[in-house]
Image (spheres, coloured by chain):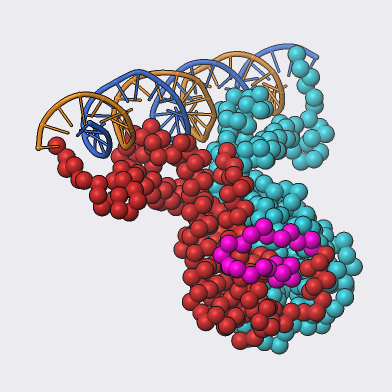
Chain colours: A cyan, B red, C orange, D blue
Amino acid sequence: MKIHNPPIQAELAGMTRRERIRGEIRDEIKAIARQQMAEQGTASLSLTAIARRMELTPPALYRYYPDRDALVTALIVDAFDALAVALADAAASQPIDQYAARLESVLLAYRSWALANPFDFQLIYGNPIPGYHAPVELTVPAVQRGASVIMGVLQAAYTAGAMHLPEELPAIAESVELRASPESGMHNQAISPLITYVCMTGWAHIHGIIMLELFNHLQPTIGNIDAFYRHEICSLIQHMGLSR
Amino acid sequence: MKIHNPPIQAELAGMTRRERIRGEIRDEIKAIARQQMAEQGTASLSLTAIARRMELTPPALYRYYPDRDALVTALIVDAFDALAVALADAAASQPIDQYAARLESVLLAYRSWALANPFDFQLIYGNPIPGYHAPVELTVPAVQRGASVIMGVLQAAYTAGAMHLPEELPAIAESVELRASPESGMHNQAISPLITYVCMTGWAHIHGIIMLELFNHLQPTIGNIDAFYRHEICSLIQHMGLSR
DNA sequence: TGTACATCAGTGAACGCGCGTTCACTGATGTAC
DNA sequence: TGTACATCAGTGAACGCGCGTTCACTGATGTAC
């Protein structure tokens, strides 16, 4: 006979003992899924293999996720969340009025997170998983949540007058036909088109370096990618006229 | 009874009739493989499915490729080749001393090729295919062949004195510990570390935009990606001090 | 030109594997009185 | 506190599928004389 723990403690946290355990197992499934991606590649994510490693039968997993796609979606959402949190933490680690330092910190965090979690990064920014189509209403806001951390820093700098952008930029930003991000969530200011444009530019640059590094296309040419990356950030900051 | 064509014509081209047909079927296999990737995603590339579409039995394909990996390798090599050719053509389409125009042309070609051949692009620059490991001695030179087209243009501009880089750049390039590309193939000049550095920066930037666009991460924010891309090239050219 | 032989493309059967998913079920856990 | 019932986690068997790869083979194509 097993112990019948009265579920008082758990109910204090707003969930029954069963609900808590369910949550834990859902998390364990995701953890093993990540582990499996790391070993076999993002594209080969199999419920059967996860069940095997958990010493369960495959059908048991259907108690926790209705099907394989639901699990993939959960992993993607988690990854976007984790990245956004990492960026937000990096932003928060610097004094609020030190815009250059904050931007630098955020961009360094972007790379650090990608290198520390290469498979989560591939999951959200790499090839789509064959046969899986992410629900758009889920991923689009998730992308923007990450981006909005960067945008928040830049918008703050701009509003504070600490940013000196090239003169021709407004006209360019205009011609690019930006779509307003519907709502930003992580920050409170509205983002001007100009800042959106600058942000996309910087993001693309940073993102390109990381993508190339992740798939080992930089390594044959660049010895010290860390220094390379730092310099790129530096020149970005300079290009934006962000005063230190 | 089928016709016994005397293999005179084919032998004039240096190969027997049989060899020619073999080559054609190898090509057809690759073509269908590409088609299949386009429909199912890069990661799901199956010999059985290819055979089915060619109305052959799966073992028949083993006459043409020793195993699945060999086919993937052939596809990758082809893709690198095609990209390098597209870039080289773009470079050749502009007057030899119009460095800005040549660079612009090459960078536009990079994106055009990626958008026109998204799956080949994913094959070479996206997630590795699960269970497949590209032979390094094949892919590293292939990457550099593409890059060397860009480098060739820039080096020529630099040598001709048509390039005015920021003053602090040499020191930065130094600190990044570039590795000399072993041999470049597509062009004749030696590439200076400074140019290598500039090239990697520009490439990463361009590459980042394309990767984001390819996976639809730019579209929610940027209405006119074409214009966006052109402006980025423009500002790159300006940043390098390439006179028009 | 015809004949004898060698080459080689493609077949069909088979091997052993893994996958997602369904279903009816058992037995443990939780709940209400 | 004990009892009766409801809930639900996990099982085992099964379905139908696709995969890469091997093997001994047939029959067409090419080659040498």
Q: Is residue B91 magenta?
A: no
> Which residue is found at the position 56% from the left and 44% from the top?
B129
Q: Quadrant of residue A60?
A: top right
Percent position of residue B149, x then y? 58, 67
Q: Is residue B181 magenta?
A: yes
* Residue A77 visible in the picture: no
**Image position of A205 (left or right of B221):** right
Q: Is residue A219 left or right of residue A138?
A: right
Magenta residue span:
B176-197
Q: Quadrant of the N terminus of chain B?
A: top left
Please name the residue shown 29% across and 50% down the image.
B10
In the displayed structure, would residue A84 be above or below residue A174?
above
Q: In x, y percent, where is residue B157?
A: 64, 79
User: Could you tell me what secondary structure mostly forms the magenta stretch?
Assistant: loop
Of the pair A214 and A38, the residue shown nearer to us: A214
Where is residue B159 shown, x and y percent of the image? 68, 78
Residue at x-position 30% and y-position 39%: B55
